[in-house]
């Protein structure tokens, strides 16, 4: 066994051990505590009273929040109905829970929950279920990365980002190497697509179109929500916020990514000469609403669910399993 395999096996065994689980829990909570501490420091620096005076009061802001909250699980119902013959309401409840895990634990923990739910309620094999989830994640990743590239392109053409500053000092050799590597990767994906991707082409196109529609609508509504609070800010600035939000959401290991985006948004407001108190108040309310809604929905789903494991977690913890004090 090579040294690399030994390290991998040691890490797997350590991660599964009680000690490893305890350390990971403390690390995760430590990261979240550090982020909250920095945010509190920033709010104090801005002025607590100033932030409170700039909290959103527009009813449209709160209406759009709930539309945005429900957009992902609603879209996933139509997506997974293409491959799983499950009732829409049952899927909707499952994807609400999946969203809560992804929001509050870390990226892709919701996918693990979805796999455990699917193997219990579907007749498909574990291998088939994993392939379905994998293919949907690939399509989602392609979609979000494509939108990010388009957004950055818009920012470049709008002269918000100076392209010459980005590549002006980069040697031509590195640019050519990057292009060649990119073409090689695309060629390999095309060559081995049957091994990387299992969905039929037509069904994959339908699912991709649903992801794209949801992605465009969601991010468009997000900019409308922000513009409701700060209508004087130009649209190009909100494009930058959306691009940052997409990048943060694509990092799988981050816990509480909405808090990290809030931290980034406050810093970005200073760079872009925005009213920092208004941005902080807006993002603070959005993050708080998200966590409160996650908690309420999780408890409602837990006590009304047919899933005895979920009921047991809720009864033992009395709250979200990943923010308990045990």
Image: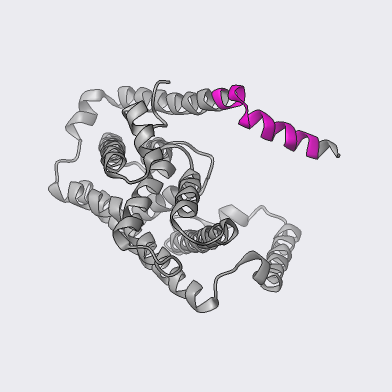
Q: Residue at x 51, y 23 (%)?
A: 26
- Quarter of the image that includes the N terminus: top right
Taken as a whole, is the magenta stretch helix, strand or loop? helix
Horizontal side, residue 312 vs residue 192: left or right: left
Nearer to the camera, 252 or 44: 252
- Quarter of the image that includes the C terminus: top left
Q: Residue furthest bottom?
A: 202
In the rendering, at what x and y percent does residue 136 appear? 50, 62
In the rendering, at what x and y percent does residue 21 appear? 56, 27
Stretch of the chain drawn in magenta: 5-22
Q: Is residue 320 visible?
A: no
| Magenta stretch holds residue 177 | no
Q: Residue at x 55, y 23 (%)?
A: 22
In the rendering, at what x and y percent does residue 185 appear? 70, 65
Nearer to the camera, 121 or 25: 121
| Magenta stretch holds residue 21 | yes
Quadrant of the image occupied by residue 275: top left
């Amino acid at each position: 066994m090579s040294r690399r395999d030994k390290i991998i096996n040691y890490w797997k065994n350590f991660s599964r051990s009680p000690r490893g689980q305890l350390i990971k829990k403390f690390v995760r909570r430590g990261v979240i505590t550090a982020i909250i501490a920095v945010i509190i420091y920033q709010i104090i620096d801005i002025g607590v009273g100033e932030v409170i005076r700039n909290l959103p009061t527009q009813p449209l802001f709160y209406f759009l929040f709930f539309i945005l909250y429900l957009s992902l699980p609603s879209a996933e119902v139509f997506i997974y109905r293409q491959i799983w013959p499950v009732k829409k309401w049952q899927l909707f409840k499952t994807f609400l829970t999946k969203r809560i895990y992804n929001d509050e634990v870390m990226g892709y923990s919701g996918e693990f929950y979805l796999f455990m739910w699917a193997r219990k309620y579907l007749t498909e094999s574990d291998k088939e279920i994993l392939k379905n989830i994998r293919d949907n994640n690939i399509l989602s990743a392609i979609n979000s990365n494509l939108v990010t590239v388009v957004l950055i392109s818009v920012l470049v053409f709008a002269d918000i980002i100076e392209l010459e500053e980005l590549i002006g000092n980069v040697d031509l050799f590195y640019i050519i190497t990057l292009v060649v590597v990119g073409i090689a990767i695309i060629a390999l994906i095309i060559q081995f697509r049957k091994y990387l991707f299992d969905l039929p082409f037509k069904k994959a196109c339908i699912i991709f179109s649903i992801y794209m529609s949801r992605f465009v609508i969601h991010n468009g509504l997000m900019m409308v929500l922000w513009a409701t609070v700060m209508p004087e800010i130009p649209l190009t600035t909100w494009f930058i916020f959306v691009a940052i939000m997409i990048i943060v959401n694509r990092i799988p290991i981050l816990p509480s990514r909405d808090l990290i985006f809030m931290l980034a948004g406050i810093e970005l407001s200073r760079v872009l000469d925005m009213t920092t108190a208004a941005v902080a108040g807006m993002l603070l309310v959005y993050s708080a609403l998200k966590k409160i809604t996650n908690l309420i929905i999780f408890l409602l789903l837990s006590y009304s669910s047919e899933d005895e494991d979920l009921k047991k977690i809720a009864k033992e913890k009395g709250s979200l399993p990943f923010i308990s004090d045990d």
